[in-house]
Image (cartoon, rainbow, N blue to C red):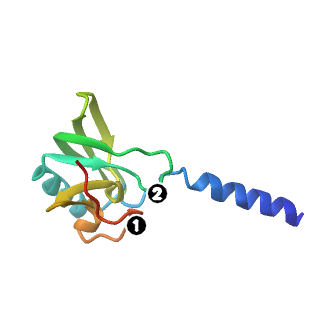
Amino acid sequence: MNKSIFVVFFGFLLHSNDVKADQLALIPLTDAKSAVEYLRAHTQVVLWCACCNSDAMLNVEILSVYYKHAGEDLYQVFLVGTDDYGNRVEEALDFAYVHIQIGEFCHALGVAMGLKCDPCTSPFKFY
């Protein structure tokens, strides 16, 4: 029995590294409004879940950003843009995995807004 529990637990740990956790995907209205304003002041973002083993950085030029009611007192922010190849990108955002350039470095939007999150990476340069 103990061996079975170990196998299940170890399997869960391996699988959990590939799962994107929603840290700041559903947020209060005030944070959604602030994020939309913040993003509208930028021309591009880097979408990247550093916690996810197979997630590649995606540079996106922002075309529009908006929020929607997601139930109860929670909202979700959406981004519409184009990637470096001209492909349309439309995503619901989690601020832990949206990075904006401040100076020379890209910072997680959640951290830049002073919200509690773990982007699983330090600020980084992206060209």
Q: What residue lies at 28% left-to-right and 67% top-to-bottom?
A: 111
Mark 1: few/some/many CA within 10 Å (<14, 14-19, 20+): some
Badge 1 amino acid: Asp
Q: Kindly identify which numbered label has been placed on residue 39.
A: none
- Please give left or right for residue 3 compared with residue 115 in the image: right
**For residue 8, what is the image quadrant?**
bottom right
Q: Secondary structure at mark 2?
A: loop
Q: Which residue is mark 2?
A: 51
Vertical placement of 125 versus 85: above or below? below
Going from the N terminus, do you reach mark 1 or mark 2 first?
2
Badge 2 amino acid: Cys
- Residue situated in front as seen by the camera: 105 or 27: 105
Q: What residue lies at 86% left-to-right and 62% top-to-bottom?
A: 3
Vertical placement of 99 versus 122: above or below? above
Q: Which residue is mark 1?
A: 118
- Residue situated in front as seen by the camera: 41 or 102: 102
- Please give left or right for residue 41 compared with residue 86 in the image: left
User: Marks 1/2: CA distance?
Assistant: 9 Å
Q: What residue lies at 40% left-to-right and 52% top-to-bottom?
A: 49
The quarter of the rendered structure image containing the N terminus is bottom right
> Where is residue 75 drawn, in percent x and y?
30, 54
- Residue situated in front as seen by the camera: 32 or 120: 120
- Please give left or right for residue 23 compared with residue 35 in the image: right
Q: Does the residue at mark 1 contact the one at mark 2 (Cβ under 8 Å)? A: yes
Q: Secondary structure at mark 1?
A: loop
**For residue 100, what is the image quadrant?**
bottom left
> Where is residue 13 drawn, in percent x and y?
64, 59
> Where is residue 115 drawn, in percent x and y?
29, 69
> Where is residue 122 drawn, in percent x and y?
34, 66
Using the rendered image of the protein, determine whether residue 68 is visible from the camera's viewpoint: no
**For residue 83, what is the image quadrant?**
top left
Q: What residue lies at 78% left-to-right and 58% top-to-bottom?
A: 7
